[in-house]
Amino acid sequence: MKLTTSRLCLDCDEVHDEPHCPSCGSESFAFLTRWVDPGGQRPAARLKPALPAPDSERLEAVRALTAPGPSSPGAMRRTLGALAGLATVGVAHWIWTSSREAARRDQAPAAPAPRPPGAGSTDGSDLL
């Protein structure tokens, strides 16, 4: 069995080189090369690739995008205009829904007016 293809079963700790563990039939495994280095390299050098040197143009672009800049004079005006627009839409929505509710109340059939006790009943059942 080669070290590069050997697997450790995570359920029964059996070492094998098959897709399923021959002992328990589990498919949960980890390659042994995760812990044992087959080529003699140091694990840290193999696991962490060297990052390329940062490009000065990219670095400047990132700094320009993330650095807080001075606010322009029109920024405050745009922000206040957007807030005024949102407030206008909110008030218009409130007026529109309240007028629809009022129209529904006007179209709903009126409830019958309550009769005074003793009026209209001949058997006296409303007096009880």
Image (cartoon, rainbow, N blue to C red):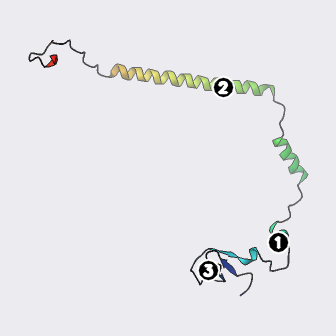
- The residues bearing labels 2 and 3 have C-alpha atoms spaced at a distance of 62 Å
Secondary structure beneath dot 3 equals: loop
Disc 3, disc 1: CB below 8 Å? no
Task: Tell me the residue that label 3 is attached to.
Answer: 19
User: Residue at 86% of width from left, 64% of height from top?
Assistant: 50
For residue 81, what is the image quadrant? Answer: top right
Image quarter (top left, top right, bottom left or bottom right) of the C terminus: top left
User: Which x, y percent locates residue 35?
Assistant: 76, 74
**What amino acid is labelled 3 in the image?**
Pro
* Horizontal and vertical percent position of residue 58: 86, 50
Residue bearing mark 1: 43
Label 2 SS: helix
Q: Is residue 49 left or right of residue 103?
A: right
> Eyeballing the image, is 83 above or below 2?
above
Say whether residue 38 is left or right of residue 111.
Answer: right
Q: How far separated are the C-alphas under marks 3 and 1?
A: 25 Å
Marked residue nearer the N-terminal end (1 or 2): 1
Left or right relative to 7: residue 72:
right
Q: In terms of depth relative to the viewer, which is nearer, 14 or 78? A: 14
Crowd around label 1: few <14 · some 14–19 · many ≥20 (10 Å): some
Q: Which residue lies furthest to the left in this view?
A: 123
Which quarter shows the N terminus? bottom right
With respect to residue 68, does 30 lie above or below? below
Name the residue nearer the viewer: 112 or 66.
112
Q: Which of marks 3 and 1 is nearer the N terminus?
A: 3
2 or 3: tag closer to the N-terminus: 3
Per the rendering, the mark at residue 83 is 2
Kindly report which numbered mark, 2 or 3, lies closer to the viewer in this rendering: 3
Alpha-carbon neighbours of circle 2 within 10 Å: few (<14), some, or many (≥20)?
Answer: few
